[in-house]
Image (spheres, rainbow, N blue to C red):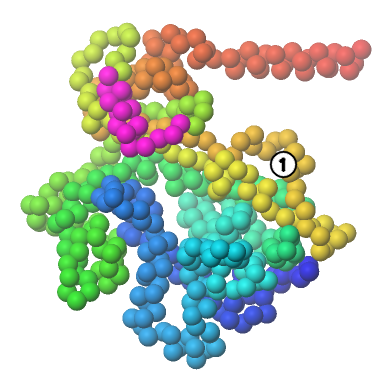
Amino acid sequence: MGENVSETMFIMYYYPDRNSKMLLFFFIIPPYPGHGPFSHMFDGMFIPKARPEITWRHETASLAMFDYLVNDNYLKPVMEHHGLVLPEDLDFIKEQIAGPLGNLVQGQKWPYKGRPEDKSFLYEIVANKRNGIDVDKWDYFARDCYHLGIQNNLDYQRFLKFARVCEVEGQKQICTRDKEVGNLYDMFHTRNCLHRRAYQHKVGNIIETMVTEAFLKADKHIQIEGSVGKMFTLSTAIDDMVAYTKLTDHVFEQILYSSSSELHDARQILRNIICRRLYKCVGQTQADKEISVNKDTIHKWEADLAQSIPQSGTQDVDLQPDDFVVHVIFMDYGMKEKNPINNVHFYCKNDLTTAFKIRKNQVSKLLPEQFAEQLIRVYCKKTDNRSLEVAKKHFVQWCMDMNFSKPQDGDIIAPELTPLKPSWSNNNEGEHDEDSGKQKKAKMQLFK
């Protein structure tokens, strides 16, 4: 097929289907309207603890919120007036949010309702489930890199310049020039940098943990009016879109400036955040292989940390399991342990219609060997200097007992402990000397 995509701000303007262009543009303005207060913290941390009996994601709420907004604002006649076909076009918008709606009927191969299979590439624009290259990612790259002062290596206009729709195994996919493969690796590296430096930053994560603790304590004491006058709490507002529309980041200030005795504990946690009295990170480590972790694992690790009394030194601080907070963080290129570029198709200038894949070993030997890692961070709720000093030694001893990697500052915070584990000996100097020897030998041979 090989149709050129014009260089416009968004790839959505390409296809000559006016309704598709309008619908994609309509969706990209308010992405994921189902996000709760503090975004992913609400659905990823608060709701699972407040209501562990349910499985709830912000994409689910986005569908319910979209239906509510359309009905509450009487938008269906407006949409039909502008040429939209209902309900197909409404399904198309929802599928941009959450993917296929409902279960496949037996014998059905194409899972989408909003557009037929010959327009399959339209589902790779807003939220690309195939490889993660989409305008949602480009949008937050530009926004967050700008505000955080991080270099954004992605030139989306260049991507659009080389983007083409080609047929791949009977479906139309968005492909790009073969020479752009290095830039795509840079794009996913930028994503990893944003997660490492911002989204999964150790201070940001512990603030989210403290806000979650405050919300859990305040949950049943916050009342939000929903449909027909029914009242909902922080955690049950997700069941009623009238109530959920009123649940914004403002709830933080509502708790912080309240005078209710019932909100005293929650209010104190938020005051600690404002005054920067945060739980302190005592260290970060890794296991040799990824560990399957659930809440029971976390509780056990917190108990083990309290019991990990160093093999040497005196113990004058009593640390309890509740004094520790363990976070398990996953860093990846957007597709867990998989390389997203393996799901991208390319074309070359000698044949603009034939799509092919490019493997990592065809690009560079300097690319990642693996595309996901699991990090384990430990925090201490006690923040006085002596408690933190002891907690760090507990952490080093725990890492030794668990056979985890040596903390980066392990030789500084526990110099009496790290030599006790032979596998933690520092071999960097030996490796450097070996490499230097090879280089010297090569030079000597070169000039014989």
Name the side, left or right, on which 81 lies relative to 398: right
Tell me what residue is drawn at x 37 percent, y 50 percent.
Answer: 44
**SS assignment at label 1:** helix
Q: Is residue 55 magenta?
A: no
Q: Is residue 303 magenta?
A: yes
Residue 377 image offset from top left, x and y in percent: 39, 32
Point out the stretch of residues depicted in magenta.
291-307
Residue 353 image offset from top left, x and y in percent: 81, 64
* Labels in figure, total: 1
Name the side, left or right, on which 306 lies relative to 130: left
Tell me what residue is drawn at x 35 percent, y 22 percent.
Answer: 395
Residue 259 image offset from top left, x and y in percent: 10, 56
Q: Residue furthest bottom?
A: 81
Tell me what residue is drawn at x 9 percent, y 56 percent.
Answer: 260
- Is 442 located above or below residue 144 in the figure? above
- Is 11 located above or below residue 375 in the figure? below
Task: Mark 1: give few (<14), some (14-19) or many (20+) Cα within 10 Å.
Answer: some
Q: Amino acid at mark 1?
A: Lys
Secondary structure, magenta segment, majority class: helix
- Asked whether the viewer can see residue 273, the reply is no
Locate the C terminus and report the quarter of the image it occupies.
top right
Residue 18 image offset from top left, x and y in percent: 61, 82
Using the image as rendered, state which of residue 220 and residue 117 is in the foreground. Answer: 117
Q: Quadrant of residue 207?
A: top left
Q: Residue furthest front?
A: 106
Using the image as rendered, state which of residue 109 and residue 343 is in the foreground. Answer: 109
Tell me what residue is drawn at x 39 percent, y 59 percent.
Answer: 58
- Is 306 located above or below residue 232 in the figure? above
- Asked whether the viewer can see residue 215, the reply is yes
- Is 337 located above or below residue 422 in the figure? below
Q: Residue furthest left?
A: 261
Q: Which residue is mark 1?
A: 360
